[in-house]
Image: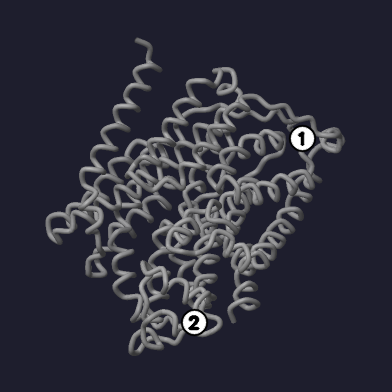
Amino acid sequence: MTELRRKQIAVVVGLVAAFAFFNFFEHVLEAAAASAVPLWLTAPFVLFLVAIAVTPFVDRAWWERNSFTVAASLGGSVAAYYVIVLGNFPRVLLTAYDYVSFLSLIGSLFVVAGGIHFNLRGKAAPWENVLLLGGGALLANVIGTTGASMLLLRPYLRSNKYRVRGFHVVFFIFLVSNIGGALTPIGDPPLFLGYLKGVPFFWVAGKAWYAWLLVLGIVLLVFYLMDSHSFGQVPKDVQEQATKPEVVKFSGLHNVWFLVIILGAVFVQRPLILREVIMWCAALASYSTTRAEVHGKNDFSFSALKEVAILFAGIFLTMIPALDWLEMNAGSLGMTSPGQFFWCSGALSSVLDNAPTYLSFLSAAMGLHGGSVDNAIHMQALLGFVQNSSVGLPNPLMPGAMALGADSWKFVQAISLGSVFFGAMTYIGNGPNFMVKSIAEQSGIKCPSFFGYIGKYSIPILIPAFVLVWWLVFS
């Protein structure tokens, strides 16, 4: 039996086991609820973030050898506390399910996109890079930020291989891996969760397109200026080659069908894990039917996926107390305006997974108005589709709650924009970010450090753009 065949059998057995396990415990998942936890229990999450940020800079070799141990120790300690001390096994099980769903989408798109090869010239001019990044931002709304990132990253790096620098990777993360996907539920996981809670499919696009266009335009302009300066430093013969018409050749285009299958699977809800099984089956079929030659041209390996799987396992487990504390204390934080929700949901989305952060703040916004995020009529009222009198509860919905006004929908708009936009602030703000960084480094590109990314790029470039959005839209 070949090694590939053994791996295929292992994947199938694992999928069957996961399917049986989660469906057996489905009643436990339905009972999952946040626990009232002390603030000190967020310490493992803070320690893990510090480890991700500092340790690779101090001793990268040690971190590569021991990242799994660190993630397992800190994440395991939180899981043990919840199960043994708090007796809240359902909360841990729900997090495990969320992690499996997260890794299934990330992993399947990584595998399938790795089987599609773009043969580019390798001497892109600044305006060509702007077109690629802008087109990638649009594409992210169709195949998701993860799908667009995995599909376009390698061609982007190859087209700039004679002059690629760290800022090329950073702006790719900004535009394709995050900001681009702010218009549709497919674009980014938080918006998909909103869609499941009753936000209409095209509602975000209608309420966010102008903010999206503003931020996209600002970031693309800054990139063009920086890339033009960089381009001016390369030899003249390279510049002349870059002005010639681009010739693009494709290999492995049959994998587009597997992309379609994965995206279709996103909307499968029952039975549990069926969605993830479909995704991994598509990935397995893609990997098995893609010629080794195509994978070789893409320098495809599972190293980046393995690194992301380890780090986000630790993040998902250690962030449980942080999210629970936020949900339990959101009402006492003094947030009463959409602008505050924009900044707060954004700040947390910079370091927490933005999908559960989105849900936590959406729950807090509904709580301000005395409603429930799981009540479809309440959601329709918050979005402005029905009047208070149609909700069937007092006006406001509960004593002490804020009245639902004509602009109540701005809370959802603020949370949507904050959760998606601010995912670009750090390498761990959104799933594709760290994967893009890892693939780029495997290609020999020196990327900024964790704090270098924030201090040199995120704060000076993104924060002014976000301040402008806040001032124009929410102030």
Q: Which residue is mark 2?
A: 387
Image quarter hosting the C terminus:
bottom right
Label total for image: 2
Which quadrant is home to the N terminus? top left
Does 435 sit above or below residue 196? above
What residue is shown at x 26% (from left), y 69% (from top)?
39
Q: Nearer the viewer, residue 323 or 235?
A: 323
Which residue is found at the position 46% from the left and 48% from the top? 267
Tell me the amino acid under the disc marked 1.
Answer: Lys
Q: Which mark is residue 123?
A: 1
Residue plotted at (50% across, 26% down): 286
* In this view, 355 is above or below 299: below
Point 64% across, 47% down: residue: 139
Residue 411 position within the rendered picture, expressed as x and y whole percent measured from the top left: 50, 75
Is 40 placed left or right of 234 in the picture? left
Q: Is residue 39 left or right of residue 11?
A: left
Q: Is residue 334 above or below residue 313?
A: below
> Disc 1 on helix, strand or loop?
loop
